[in-house]
Image: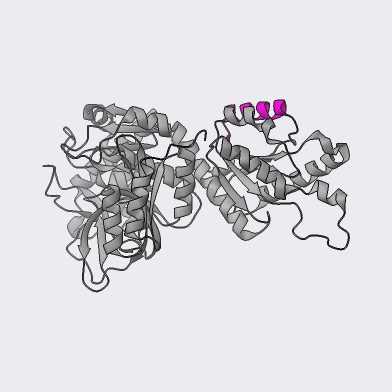
Amino acid sequence: MSLKRLEVWFITGSQHLYGKEALDKVAEHSKQIAGSLDGASVIPLSVVWKPVLTTADAIRRLCLEASSADACVGLVFWMHTFSPAKMWIAGLNLLSKPFLHLHTQFNRDLPWSTIDMDFMNLNQSAHGDREFGFITARLRLARKVVVGFWQDPDVLGEISTWMRAAAGWNESQHLKVARFGDNMRDVAVTEADKVEAQRVFGFSVSAYGIGDLTDRINQFTDAEANTLVKEYRDTYTIESKYDRPDSLMEAARIELGLRAFLVEGGFGAFSDNFEDLHGITQLPGIAAQRLMADGYGFGAEGDWKSAALLRILKVMAEGLPGGTSFMEDYTYDFSGTPRELAAHMLEVCPSIASGKPTLEVHPLGIGGKADPVRLVFTASAGPAVVACIVDMGTRFRMIANAIDVVAPSEPLPKLPVARAVWIARPSLKVAAAAWIFAGGAHHTAFSYPITMEHLEDFAEIAQIELVRIDEDTKLHELRHELAWSDGIPPLRGR
């Protein structure tokens, strides 16, 4: 998932009023900023400079070109001089890619002793960007605004975060989710409108009978399964009591078939349901875990929204330290500082493991299948976020909580699943109530490298509501925000 193959176009606005000499200087400065951004180590995408725009027709053509360019996932706009914003209306109305408004200027410091009107006429970002800001607000366009000198670390960090969100949005536009079976029976929160999801997010969700998957699984030979079992043995710690060749062979065959099905169909995410796995002898435990580790999205019990969100966050987090995984809220410890023990039956991604996972085989006690193979580990300590997307009937809502993962208070020798223990911000008492008031799901995408800012930028691009739960959350304020959000019309454009 190399993000450098994706482009963000650097666009500078001006006008012909200033003359050729000034416009040449604008172009020179613009190229220098774009080149500096492109070469900055923190910037994850390629930055491509485009010629300075000075007319409505040039702006319209540029916006059409960007909208149709596959490699372009977003634009950065900067007004070096004053650029009358009525020129931008037609182009911005046609633009289908997300954009960031960079409010900066070429020079960090003012040359106090030599400043003259030539300098003032050339360096007009202070009011040129305000003119552009008005028209984007007047058109109710979704965008991010970053203010500061273009070489400052905080500015680069904000731009980088938005670029990752734009990359996630681009992935969402092309993502295909394979859904094996239906949702778990009678569960509400995993249901959603797939047509509306494709309209809002771009990704498609296609259903396949479990027989389609079992047919592909059964095409793999014992020799091919044995090769993958050897990889299991080389990669993970396996105690002798869990070294069950028949179980390992079947798990390997399931992984081979599932991986082949996803690759051949061009899918980036998938969901399954333990109530609908006829023909498969054990639940796809280690298969789902290893596929997630390779970047696939996954959702249990038919939860295709979680599968799609996980894939999107994995793309956004590409190249950053720390893992991203499917997760489920499970149980609490209310003693001392209240905390949560989160896990799932089988499917937690080993990218979040604090050490080398162990491969184990245990009865599941649900689903009526043979004992499944799974990887067991504890998540690393550190700050993280958990997020979900829910269908509120009239709109999609993202709910996110900032958390701090901690070590378990005691060993967990009888819990044969991967798990994470965390303290929710601002506290479990407030965070859990806020999550419930907002209608948050019990399935989430969990991530160390993704931050609230990444999620805010993605939600802004997608034009969906984000309910943010963190150290600043106050329940009475959040409940007012939830009520107000029902009456606020969405932004336009990307």
Instruction: Tell me where residue 309 sits by quadrant.
Output: top left
At x 87% / y 36%, what residue is drawn? Answer: 20
The x and y percentages for residue 8 are 61, 40
Q: Taking the image as drawn, is residue 432 in sight?
A: yes
* Residue 268 within the magenta-colored segment of the rendering: no
* Residue 69 within the magenta-colored segment of the rendering: yes
From the viewer's side, name the closer residue of 470 and 292. Answer: 470
At x 54% / y 31%, what residue is drawn? Answer: 96
The x and y percentages for residue 232 are 31, 50
Coloring applied to the structure: one colour
The x and y percentages for residue 147 are 63, 53
Bounds of the magenta segment: 54-74
Using the image, determine if residue 83 lies above or below residue 61.
below
From the viewer's side, name the closer residue of 241 and 365. Answer: 365
Q: Residue 152 vs residue 306: left or right? A: right
At x 58% / y 55%, what residue is drawn? Answer: 157
Q: Taking the image as drawn, is residue 296 in sight?
A: no
Instruction: Tell me where residue 223 sits by quadrant.
Output: top left
